[in-house]
Image (cartoon, grey):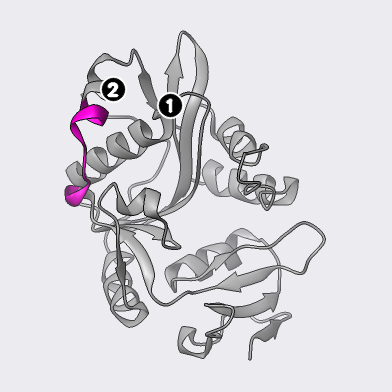
């Protein structure tokens, strides 16, 4: 059964997470920098609807993407070359988060509350949270955001206002993380969209073991910029 957090500075073992709903580990606590960093270091992330207690998750299996294994189709490669996009990092973090929280056809995204935006903006200001932005003609048309600790990147959410704008951001991020020797991009939950880009599932035990290695490596603080 999930455990209620109060003033604890640590989480219960991820092996105690529920199977149904998959990965529910704990509830309560807060979105302080210390608790969020502790969560990510142990393969745990917050996901909850406004008005609910904070829920903490560690699903099994875990969807991950190895940066050098990203799959780029011919059509997507052409879109990257000829789409007229400009890619930036860490120039509009809060704007990316708010865009990820905006209305969508699948109605997913409202979990990114103002409290979440504030908490992750604090992480961004401390060099742990990052945005990858797709721009066209000075307008933000797509992107994603996530958290980095050591040589591990935890993807949180993405959005598109133009076809393939978020995919372009993910491809560019994966290429940059490969240059920086990052080992994994955590995609959290399994989706066909991410699978089409080369993401795969990993048993939680294997994910936690690999994560433990990567978070101990030297941190690459923000703000980030793309290498030439």
Asked if disc 2 and disc 1 are in contact, CB closer than 8 Å, the reply is yes
Q: Is residue 225 magenta?
A: no
Q: Is residue 151 above or below residue 22?
A: above
Q: Classify residue 135 as left or right of residue 198.
A: right
Residue 73 shows up from this direction: yes
The range drawn in magenta is: 68-77
Name the element at disc 2: helix
Pick the quarter of the image with the C terminus.
top left
In the orientation shown, which residue stands out farthest toward the right?
A: 51
Q: Dot 1 corresponds to which residue?
A: 163
Pick the quarter of the image with the N terminus.
bottom right
Residue 227 shows up from this direction: no
Q: Is residue 12 above or below residue 151?
A: below
Q: Classify residue 7 as left or right of residue 184.
A: right
Q: Dot 2 corresponds to which residue?
A: 79
Residue at x 60% of width, y 30% of height? 95
Q: Position of residue 98 (x, y in %)?
A: 64, 36
Q: How many marks?
A: 2
In the orientation shown, which residue stands out farthest toward the top?
A: 137
């Amino acid at each position: 059964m999930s455990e209620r957090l109060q003033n604890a500075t640590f989480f219960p073992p991820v092996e105690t997470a529920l199977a149904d709903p998959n990965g529910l580990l704990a509830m309560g606590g807060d979105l302080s920098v210390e608790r969020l960093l502790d969560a990510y270091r142990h393969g745990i992330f917050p996901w909850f609807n406004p008005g609910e207690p904070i829920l903490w998750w560690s699903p099994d299996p875990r969807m991950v993407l190895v940066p050098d294994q990203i799959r780029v189709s011919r059509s997507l490669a052409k879109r990257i070359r000829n789409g007229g996009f400009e890619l930036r990092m860490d120039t509009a973090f809060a704007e990316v988060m708010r865009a990820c929280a905006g209305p969508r056809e699948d109605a997913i995204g409202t979990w990114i509350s103002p409290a979440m935006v504030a908490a992750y903006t604090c992480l961004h200001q401390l060099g742990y949270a990052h945005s990858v932005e797709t721009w066209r003609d000075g307008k933000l048309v797509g992107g994603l955001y996530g958290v980095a600790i050591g040589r591990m990147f935890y993807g949180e959410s993405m959005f598109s206002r133009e076809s393939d704008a978020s995919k372009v951001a993910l491809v560019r991020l994966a290429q940059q993380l490969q240059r920086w020797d990052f080992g994994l991009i955590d995609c959290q939950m399994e989706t066909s969209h991410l699978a089409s880009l080369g993401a795969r599932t990993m048993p939680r035990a294997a994910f936690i073991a690999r994560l433990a290695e990567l978070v101990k490596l030297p941190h690459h603080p923000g703000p980030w910029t793309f290498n030439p």
